[in-house]
Image (cartoon, rainbow, N blue to C red):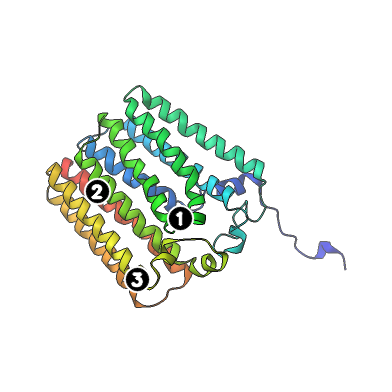
Amino acid sequence: MPDSLFPQATPEPTWKAIARLLRWDKPAGRLILIVPALWAAFLAAEGRPAIGLVITIIFGAFATSAAGCVINDLWDRDIDPQVERTKLRPLASRKLSVSIGIAVFLGTLTLSAVLATYLYRLYPLMFWLCVAAVPVIVCYPLAKRVFPVPQLVLSIAWGFAVLICWSAVTGALVGATWWLWGATVLWTLGFDTIYAMADREDDRRIGVNSSALFFGSQVVNAIAVFFAGTVLCFVKVGLLLGLGGVFWVGLAIAGIGWGWQCWVLSRSALVRSEYGRLFGQNVWLGFVILLGEIGHYWI
């Protein structure tokens, strides 16, 4: 019987595979990096950062996040096919070649460098913090092979968003900056451990590390500690900067949201998609805190 009688699968266009490589089809992971960057920008500028700076921060966050995703997939192109959640990624499924992946990585890294160089004229400290963040971003995917809690490396990379954006506004780092950095690191440890819970069986079989495996039966308690620490760090930020009622309301809502997530996680084992849904909720909880910060200065 002629093949023409049967529908043929349409090959995925290269541009669409590149978009998936950059995770443009999954905006939550991009937005969740923008959130701490904007926390820092709005607090450092007392609620009124320059529009041009905010736009640059958003583009920089997208470019840096994209670079991180590509280098992650390059390092893990032989591991990802063995993981249910990642086996269809473009490099894992060989939709894209390694050479294309490297070219895309260099392109996103170059864009990040251009944006950082543009801001160098404001404060050199910000530029050098960008430079310091690159090795952490590049080496994070390797951490799962040698370090028992690789999510900590990712959290430190996420924390650079606070340091870079705060210094881009003021040219200096103060006590409140470091407490905000602490909140970001702990928050990232919390939500990325939730994300890692979906891959526990695959990671254990392959032999790679994750915080979800490291904490074992106490993983939900560990997540609760991370989120509680996030709230405490934000309390210190609020006290140091004299933030008012709107900020505290936003923080309370976020704290309740994190408590609810821990309760959901503690009830029973969830299907893989539920862990991703809980991860995505952290984007909105982060924006609630951002609105609280903005509201303090504008209301």
Identify the secondary structure beneath mark 1: loop
Using the image as rendered, state which of residue 175 and residue 31 is in the foreground. Answer: 175
Residue found 43% across the figure and 30% down from its top: 115
Question: Mark 1 or mark 2, which has the lower sequence index?
Answer: 1
On screen, residue 129 above or below 98: above
Determine crowd level at label 1: few under 14, some 14-19, many 20+ residues with C-alpha closer than 10 A.
some
Residue 12 position, x and y percent, is: 66, 52
**Which class describes the residues within 10 Å of circle 2: few (<14), some (14-19), or many (20+)?**
some
Task: Quickly name the residue at label 1.
Answer: 147
Single out the mark in the foreground, 3 or 2. Answer: 3
Q: CA distance from mark 1 to mark 2?
A: 36 Å
Q: Residue furthest bottom?
A: 268
Q: Nearer the viewer, residue 297 or 274?
A: 274
Mark 3 highlights which residue? 218
In the rendered structure, the answer to whether residue 67 lies left or right of residue 170 reads right
Q: Which mark is residue 291?
A: 2
Q: Secondary structure at mark 3?
A: helix
- Residue 177 x/y as whole percent: 24, 41
Q: At label 2, which amino acid type do we have?
A: Leu
Q: Disc 3 marks which amino acid?
A: Gln
Single out the residue that lies furthest toward the right: 1
- Mark 1 is on which residue type? Phe
- Dots 3, 2 in contact, CB < 8 A: no
Give the residue displayed 34% in from the left and 36% down from the top.
164
